[in-house]
Amino acid sequence: MGKKENQLNNLKESLRKKENQLRKQQEEITKKENTMKQQQEEVTKKVTEMKEQQLELHKREELYKSQMEELRMKEGLLKQKEEELRIKEDLLKEQSLQAPKKEQNEAIQKLFPFLSEKVMDQLTQYGISSCEDMNHLKQKDWEALDIPSFRISTIKQRLKEINDMKQALKSQFPFLDNISITTLIEAGIYKTEDMLFGYFPDFDKLKLSVSMKTQLVAFVKDFNDRATKLKTQFPFLLDHEIKALIERRINEPSDIHLIHNWNEYELSHVTKNKMMSSLSNFTQNRFFNDNVDIPDTINFNALISLTPEEIRIIEDAGLLSFKESIKMVFQLENHNIADTIIDTEIENGVKKHIHFASTLKLEESLAIYFYTIQWSQYSLPNLYQLLNSTLSSLTKREQKPNNFKTYLHFLMSALAKLPEWRFKTVYRGIHRNILQEYPEKYLKGKTIIWYSLTSTTTNKQVADDFIKDEGTLFVISEVLTGKSIQSLSMYEEGEVLIPPGAKFLITDIVSNQNRNIIHIKQVP
């Protein structure tokens, strides 16, 4: 029994082991089945993904095909447009080639309106594109054009007229080149008057270079400004008379003083008479300074005296020092055009200095010349007015005229070197009734002092013309300290300058209502 039980136990144990093995095998099989299921699911998923990818690729392929078709359509449209643009470009090129010819023909037609279309075609075929080309044609060339001889004569005559126009325009506008002048003529501008006096305001229509157009506009504007001033003052002037005056440098109404020979100007007899009658209205008022008396006695020489060091510095600087002195007088230190104005007048003064050929230094001659200039033409007060106003305002405090001391040095040095104009008679007019204003001072036998620089004239008519029916005429005899500055003055009117501080004795008074004559003589 025991043996069988052992065998049975062993058998049971063996069966148990086999069951365990079978169970493990079953578990492994189950595990493998699960793994296979997972793999199958993954395969199914991948297959699904591949199908989706294939579907996406198919969609993209369809989209690509659609886009390619659209691109082919656009390419076709682009080629069509390119062809249209090429056709238009060819048309524009053809038109651009024809436009100059058309413009050239129109320009020639304007200058030669009598030419027929047939003649114009012949000229074009021969290569004639402007009136300039015609100037180079020789007789055999004209004959080759197959143009009637009478027509050739007419063309040549017209060419001569055009060349004369060019020369006239060139003389008036020297800065214009030949092409620009031809352009003006082709635009219908045959003479200077066609642009001046506001007759041709639209310069933008002229086919000129920017540089030429700028210069032309500036020139015409400057001329019209000057013409307006002359026309305003002298409304009786005709356009060609204004042009003649400006060409002779009569730019301001006051410039008529510069006219010494009226026959040299292209003016009508009536205009000359009217202009000469107007001359007295512009007589320089240096001869008619209202400053007639200074109540206080002032040491003038002390006021304008400079130290030796100041004189050395001024004279070493020479012309530069003179220019700076003028800037100080007018307070133009920061004036943009000060140098241009002063340099222009220095050039004019140098001519006077050279012609005068005296012992004066250039700066001294310029000091006299600048004293006589009508500075109103530059919208500045006249120098003699500024100077005399300053001198007249000085008091016994003997305050130095600092703005004028350098200029006064040159002026007084010049006057000191000029020979004295002695024992002669000069005249000075004042547009005031001095006897009424100073009844106690201007009496026969009394002495008066003129503290300012006194401009007088040797021409009595000049003073009389200014006073006319109202004012005071001083007849100054036996002048002791007078200096003739006529040769250095801007105007040739027999000017004699009497330095400040001159003393005079009243010798006679002739009163006639509003017009008085006071006779005085200079005394030491």
Image (spheres, rainbow, N blue to C red):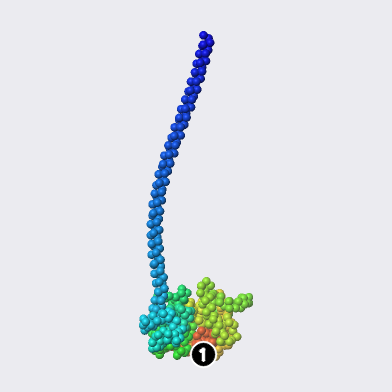
Between 466 and 259, the one lying in front of the other is: 259
Q: Position of residue 344 (x, y in %)?
A: 52, 79
- The quarter of the displayed image where residue 368 is located: bottom right
Between 59 and 416, the one lying in front of the other is: 59
Give the residue number, with chain letter if any, for mark 1: 425
Residue type, label 1? Thr
Residue lying at 51% horizontally and 16% vertically, measured from the top left: 11
- The quarter of the displayed image where residue 343 is located: bottom right
Q: Is residue 279 visible?
A: no
Between 405 and 330, the one lying in front of the other is: 330
**Side of 465 relative to 524 (left or right):** left
In the image, residue 213 sits, relative to residue 240, either above or below, namely above
Residue lying at 41% horizontally and 79% vertically, measured from the top left: 124
**Side of 114 relative to 334 (left or right):** left
Label 1, secondary structure: give it: loop
Q: How many marks?
A: 1
In the image, residue 503 sits, relative to residue 102, either above or below, namely below
Q: Position of residue 490 (x, y in %)?
A: 51, 84
**Side of 85 relative to 370 (left or right):** left
Q: Position of residue 61 (x, y in %)?
A: 41, 49
Residue lying at 38% horizontally and 88% vertically, measured from the top left: 150
Q: Assign the C terminus to one quadrant of the image.
A: bottom right
Q: Residues within 10 Å of mark 1 (few under 14, many from 20)?
A: some
